[in-house]
Image: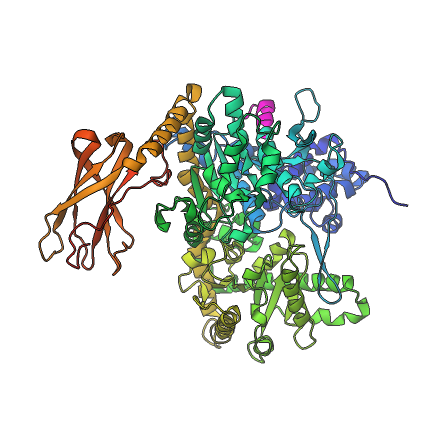
Amino acid sequence: MRAIRRFTVRTALPESLAPLSDLVMNLRWSWHPPTRDLFASVDPKTWAAVEHDPMRLLGAVSAERFAELGRDDDFLARLHAAHDHLKRYLSEPRWYQGLADSVDPHAADASAVPRTIAYFSPEYGVTAVLPQYSGGLGILAGDHLKAASDLGVPILGVGLLYRAGYFRQSLSGTGWQLETYPVTDPYGLPLTLLLETDGTPLRISIVLPGQRTLSAQVWKAQVGRVPLLLLDSDIEDNAPAERDVTDRLYGGGGEHRLLQELLLGVGGVRAIRAYCRITGTPEPEVFHTNEGHAGFQGVERIRELVTAEGLTFDAALEAVRAGTVFTTHTPVPAGIDRFPRELIEQHFGGEVGATGVPIDRVLTLGAETYEGGDPGLFNMAVMGLRLAQRANGVARLHGVVSRGMFNGLWPAFDTDEVPIASITNGVHAPTWVAREVLALAQHALGGELIEEDQAFQSLEQIGDGEIWAVRRLLRERLVVEARRRLRASWLVRGASPAELGWVDDVLDPEVLTIGFARRVPSYKRLTLMLHDPARLTALLTHPERPVQIVIAGKSHPADDGGKKLIQQLVQFADQAGVRHRIVFLPDYDMAMAADLYPGCDVWLNNPLRPLEACGTSGMKAALNGCLNLSILDGWWDEMYDGENGWAIPTADGIEDPDHRDALESAALYDLIENAVAPRFYDRGAAGSGAEGLPTRWIAMVRHTLRSLGPQVLASRMLHDYVGQMYRPAAGSARTLDGPGHLLAQELADWKHKVAKAWPAVQVDHIETTGVSDTPQLGEQLATRAFVSLGELGSDDVEVQLVYGPATGDDRLVRPRIAVLQPAQAYEAGHWRYEGTVALDRAGSFGFTVRILPRSAYLASTAELNLVAVPNAPSGITDGVLR
């Protein structure tokens, strides 16, 4: 008989064990091994049976066992020690608190340290116990929160609570991906329901078309020092359709997807306001949107200022933009959510959540007004960029790609001047680095390991034998876990236990192990390794230098093309001749990754360059001493140094995808056969003092840990965000958030004035002196620019001399900028500007003069997308100067 309803009853612990509940409900345990050891000691067999889920552990352990622990002095001593450690972690000043103490907390400039930062993301990968993630975006968001907690950065996370999460993956008998959606009960998760001061559950509501209402309750996950608010629409207040809004991560399409993003953005802001009111937490000064899914948070904040404080839309827009940071993660337009314009108009008209905000202004925020854009669609990433004064990509190369992809929003500027910066992602070492690797660093440091540069640099002091012993242990652990998972997968696929004796011989802890695990869109090329099956088989079964490959990954449920790639890989791996050397493990998640990254010797990544935004899986592998074998894309493009792994050559410019795959797969096979495998199997000879050790391989491992460790840490990433984004955004927000937001209105009025007057702004004439007929190094180029500013004054503009190397078609390459100074004003808005620069490099040299709007309140000179340049080439045109 089936139950009509299922729910979780939480355990009531004895008073003496009450601190155990605090430890379980703070997700810091997910990256704090001593706390997990304490949980394991409650009941080791049950801990293994519940897959290291402390909430399930509390529900599975008998009352008798808890009573026994309540009388166990040794356990109680360890419990109180762990609890005291957590309290110190939550209360003691950390890096950010020292930073905040060093500046004026009310500073309205670039030194401002925000009191609270709101961080919006559609998914969060904090722990496998809280299945609210699908891939890299969510894992990055989880690492962002955990690193913020470790550093004391006052972030307040906002997301949605999906009752069925993403999906659980299994395989059919033919290797086709199958999906199931196990429903989770929030009461069985490490979450607390946010209550009003009178003890009733908090409700967040959004008015929808057709006299409908979307309401949500708010759950809180405590991620160390960081609260994470998760909105849940599965409540009785809602009609069935609205209850299902938070059913699945990235589920559905059309209005369903739009309602998820409305709840995340609009509802998320309202949840923040309620949380701050209830708890006394300072209101956020900076709002950071992790991808465009939460873009409506900006619209809601504009609505607040328009309706509650009487600001004009333009003034409210400036106030909101000043404190908003937008991070784009996609390198392809297809990865951006776009909705029919009519659907947005329907949901933001009348009495919807944006009441008081003109619908035409909302539509303009997401309009694809650039060349090639679709006027019938509303683009969430475009809205995110227009609502944020500061934006960034997630790797240096991804910044380049993003500036090219979104150049249409700033057509007056060259691609490299598009105001999208780069902050390369990082990974949270305590989460992803194996305990044995951390123990090596801790031993070398002689104390508790902290996430700083010296932790990985200290491994220089560890002997080759110790490093290799740890690497072999981790590889052996992966082999054992892979066999367990492979056996379970085959049983689900319909095999009987009697047929699976061969699984006991799958993989070998002595064989070079390559890992490949990620989502399975086509551009990541899961099956590139299969391009020449005979050659791959030869590598796998080489008599002296065999290779084994462990593969995992999920395809989006609606992506049959991705599922086909998985099936092709699985069917190859099923063949009797290779199945002991290549395996596909279904249901890739954080729990699997904990063994996969550390256990591999080489991490493979072969996307179509430059379509990988960052690719942090390779970072996690590197921190465990795994060497990367990757296309120069994402983070690897900027951090590969020739000694920390191998770069797969790319066939850039080849338009035929099959031909490109053939060339790049051949390069991959060549590297494995002629470089990677020989290095791994090159062992020290007898009497060398390094018998049996691959000393050159270990040297690469040591170099990888020492050189990449400081660069790929999430703590470095948070330092970058605080310095480059959060502090400047807080300074701008405080400046425009003064009494009555007068400066916000002043900025809005100034922008309107400049835009109206700009058609009359022009460069009339340029004169240069100081350079001989045959220019020489060291000569001084003196420039006088005569410009017309119309109704604008010299305080409204900046006149620049742009100069540097010039190509044959007069394009400036990596130009430098010198600001010309106003020298004389003439009648009718005419001015003369002057400046001098030195010719400090030989070769072709070019220059031009341009005029840009200037205001202390702008974060970028490209912000208004206005520039005036000479109508015709000016200057010396003797072939050297242009």
> Does 514 appear in magenta?
no
**Quarter of the figure with residue 67:** top right
Q: Is residue 853 visible?
A: no
Q: Position of residue 696 (x, y in %)?
A: 45, 69
User: Which secondary structure class fits the magenta region best?
Assistant: helix
Residue 21 at least partly seen:
yes
Q: In the rendering, at what x and y percent does residue 642 appear?
A: 40, 64
Q: Is residue 106 above or below residue 363?
A: above
Q: Which residues are magenta?
A: 272-282
Picture mark count? 0
Give the answer, above or below, for where 342 lies relative to 579.
above
The image shows residue 515 at horizontal and vertical percentages of: 57, 63
Residue shown at the point (59%, 79%) measured from the top left: 534
| Along the viewing direction, whichever of 46 and 567 lies nearer the viewer | 567
Query: Percent position (x, y) of residue 432?
Result: 56, 51
Image quadrant in which the C terminus is located: bottom left
Q: Name the foreground residue: 571 vs 302.
A: 302
Residue 673 drawn above or below residue 156: below
Please name the colour scheme applied to the rendered image: rainbow
- 140 or 377, nearer to the observer: 377
> In terms of image quadrants, where is residue 553?
bottom right
Residue plotted at (56% across, 48% down): 137
Q: Is residue 264 above or below residue 452?
A: above
Residue drawn 79% across and 65% down?
494
Looking at the image, the residue that sits furthest to the bottom is: 543
The quarter of the picture where the N terminus appears is top right
